[in-house]
Image: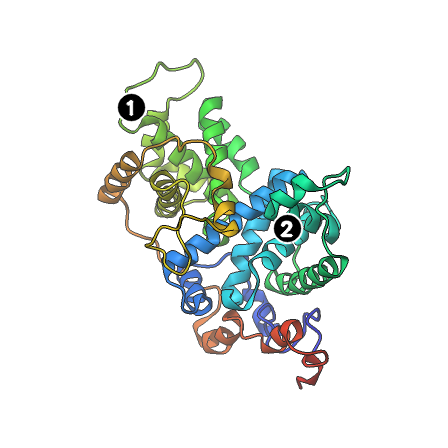
Amino acid sequence: MDATNPNTRDSPSQLPASHVKYHLPYFTPTEVEQLSDKQRGKLSVTQEERARQQACGFIEAVGAKIGFPRKTIATAQNLYHRFHLFFPRKDFSFYDVTLAALYVSSKMHDTLKKPREILMVAYAVRFPELAAKSKSVAGEVDMDPATVEHDRQRLLAVERLILETICFNFTSRLPFPYVIKIGRAFGATKKLTKLAWRLAIDSHRTVVNLEYPPHVVALACLYLAALLSSFEQGTSPERPGCNSSHQIAATLGKPGKWEQQFQAHIADLEEIVHAILDLLTAAAQNPLANTSPATPSSPSPHPSRSQHYASLHSQQPAPYKADQLIRLKIVLRESEHERRLRESAVPKELHAETEASLLGRNEGTVRFLFGPPGAADDEP
C-alpha cells in the first residue's frame, strides 16, 4: 500500500467523496480531546503536555538556528500537534516527527531546505559538544553517513504521513498579520501589539490554532495582552490616538458589536486565553523543568537532551509571576461566559463511519514506515 496515495484505504486524511464537502480545517475542542485520548496511550495528560513542549522547544531551536522565519516555525509546531491527533506518540521518534514537520512547513512557506540541511542543524542542536569539536567551516557535526541517510529516509517517511494529516492542503493561515490589523482597529499601542504578537507565538505551543481560525486567535492574544498589561496595574497615561489596555480589556471582556464585526465569540476568546495562560503559568512555575519522563514527580540531577530542548525558549526569566497569572485566571473564571458548544463538521448520521478515519487507524501506512520491506505492499 502506497503511503503517499491520498486514496489509500484507512488513510486518516481520506473521506468518501460524499463526505468531502463537510471537511473543515478546524477541530472542535471535543474532537481534539477525543483524538488526543486515543493517541496518548499510557501517557498521562501531564506527560503528554511535557512531550508537546519538548517538541515545540526543539522545533524552535532548530528553526531559529537554520534561519527559518517565524511563519515556518509556527506552522511546523502546528503540524506536529496535528500529526499526533492521528498517530500514537509511542510509535514515532520525537526527532522524526519534529524535523519532518519543519520540512513540510518549509515547503508550505517557500523557505525550502533540503532534508540533509535540516538534519545537520538538528544534530548541532542535539549534540552541541560534537558541534563544538567540528572542523567543518559550516559547523556541521561529523556524523556517520549511513546514520544521516537512515535519518533522512525516516524523515521523508514521516513527511508522507504529515501530508496525509493535512489532506495534502498546503494552505497555511497564521494569526500574526491579524494581530497587527486588529491592534490598529482597536487603537492599541505598539507596545501592546508587540505583546499580543509574542502571545500569538506562544499560542502555537498549544492546540488552539487547530481549533480556531487565526483571526480569533489574534483577537484572543490582544485580549490577553490587554489583561496582562492592566490586571492589578494602575491606569497608565493614555497616548494620543490610542486606547489604553484597560479600555481594550473592558471592550473585549464583554459581548458587543466587535463580535459581529470580527466574526468571533467572547466565549471562544476566553477558551484561548485560558489555554495560553496555562502555558505561561507552567513556564513561570518551573521555567527550567528538570524531571524524568518516567518519574515526573522526581527531580533528576542529569537533565536529558529532550528536557534541554523544552527549556531552550526559557533562557530569560518569565515576565510574569505564577501567582499573578493564577489570580488572573480566577478572576476570569468568576466572570466567564457560558462555553459555546461547537458541533462537529461531520453530520451525526455519518459520525460512526468517519470516526474510524478521524482516529488515525492507518495500519497500512504505519506498516509502511516500521514494517519489513514489502510489508505495506501486502495490505489488500
- Residue 327 horizontal/vertical position (percent): 25, 37
Q: Which residue sits furthest left?
A: 334
Q: Which residue is mark 2?
A: 102
Location of mark 1 (residue)? 233
Vertical arrangement, residue 326 with respect to residue 162, above or below:
above
Query: What amino acid is labelled 2 in the image?
Result: Leu
- Residue located 66% across and 84% down the image: 379
Give the x, y percent position of residue 348: 43, 73
Vertical arrangement, residue 240 with respect to residue 302, above or below = above
Task: Say whether residue 326 is left or right of residue 241.
Answer: left
Sequence-wise first label, 2 or 1: 2
Mark 2 to mark 1: distance in Å?
A: 40 Å
Q: Are marks 2 and 1 in contact (CB under 8 Å)?
A: no
Q: Is residue 185 visible?
A: no
Q: Is residue 301 visible?
A: yes
Kindly identify the amino acid type of the residue bearing the numbered disc 1.
Gln
Instruction: Quadrant for residue 226, please give it.
Output: top left
Disc 2 secondary structure class: helix
Residue at the (36%, 59%) spot, across then down: 295
Residue 10, above or below 113:
below
In-front residue for pair 125/169: 125
